[in-house]
Image (spheres, rainbow, N blue to C red):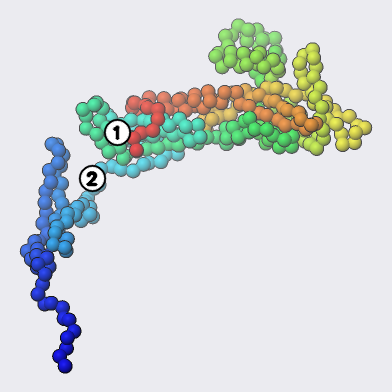
Amino acid sequence: MPDTTPRPSRIPSEAQAVADIVRSHIKPEIARITGQPGQTVTEILVLPDGQGGLRAESVKPFLDPYRDKPERREGIATLTNLDSLIAHVNRFKDDDSALFCIDDPTNPALVAVLDYHRSGAESDPRFGKHRARYDFPLSDEWLAWKAVGGEPLEQGAFAEFLEDRIVDVMAPPAFLTGDAPAGQKAAQKAATPDDSDKRLIDLVAKIGGKVCGHGKLMELAKGLRIHDQQKVQEVINTASGEAKLRFESEHRDEAGKPIDVPNLFLIAIPVFRKGHFYRIPVRLRYRLQGGRITWLLSLHRPDLFFTDAVEGACDRAAEETELPLFYGQPES
């Protein structure tokens, strides 16, 4: 009986024949493409795609291993202090390099784009891939005081914070307390207060209280530590407006000793690590509810001190590099 199983045809299809002809006759070759006027000629490798057509491949991967230098400078140098950023920029800058100040309160930075676009609307663009960056390191002191700003603190937590950060508290200036010797008072009277002194004097006058130093705050912290679990009563001197806290002992037959409560003190801290110190007023307030007390610490206008620190550093970089300074993010 004859074998009737279908057998594949040995006659190639028309498409297959064309593909075979292309593979056998078309060889890889280099094609040159000319772009816009002034641009370099680009070379591509033209190859059969195995399907009867052609495909283009860049020759760059084949040539890169044989280069003796990169085509252009790229990458971001991360510097850890402002002096290094200035030195790095001066090493690589050209007439069109630019500085960008990122004044984000949580992540401030200064970025230099060394291959920034040429100046002028009709000028040639550049890649902007060669950069230097300095992330301003917020100081531990700044972060600590900002973290508690406006946040209610229970009595024990508040006492612990005061004890931990008492080194940041400065003695109030004599022009606020009137405690200077006679000779110094005469000199202060003749001297003209600077703008920061005037703002501080005005703030104290508006609050209507006395500025205290670290000694009074330590006394307050220790007193709060002793009376951590006791109920509290508020006693106000109606003549002076000064407030005292009287703690009620757990043994109700024993009265607690009154503790004077200041409403303003000064801290001296840097905004940035290893930066110069700022004299910052801190308001101290408390709330009584159900015989329990919570405390509030508020830095007075911390945004002003942050802005001054950022702008001062960026202005210095612009002056020492002689580059334009922009506020914001450079093009990505």
Report whether 155 appears left or right of 74: right
Which quadrant of the view contains residue 56? Answer: bottom left
Q: Nearer the viewer, mark 2 or mark 1?
A: 1
Percent across and percent down for residue 7 are: 16, 81
Task: State the residue at coordinates (30%, 43%).
Answer: 74
Q: Which residue is mark 2?
A: 71
Task: State the residue at coordinates (49%, 25%).
Answer: 307
The reply to whether residue 41 is visible in this rendering is yes
Task: State the residue at coordinates (25%, 47%).
Answer: 70
Seen from this angle, which residue lies furthest right?
253
The reply to whether residue 141 is visible in this rendering is no
Q: Is label 1 in a helix, a strand or a loop?
A: loop
Q: Residues within 10 Å of mark 1 (few under 14, many from 20)?
A: many
Upstream in sequence: badge 2 or badge 1: 2
Q: Which residue is mark 1?
A: 116
Percent across and percent down for residue 64 are: 22, 52
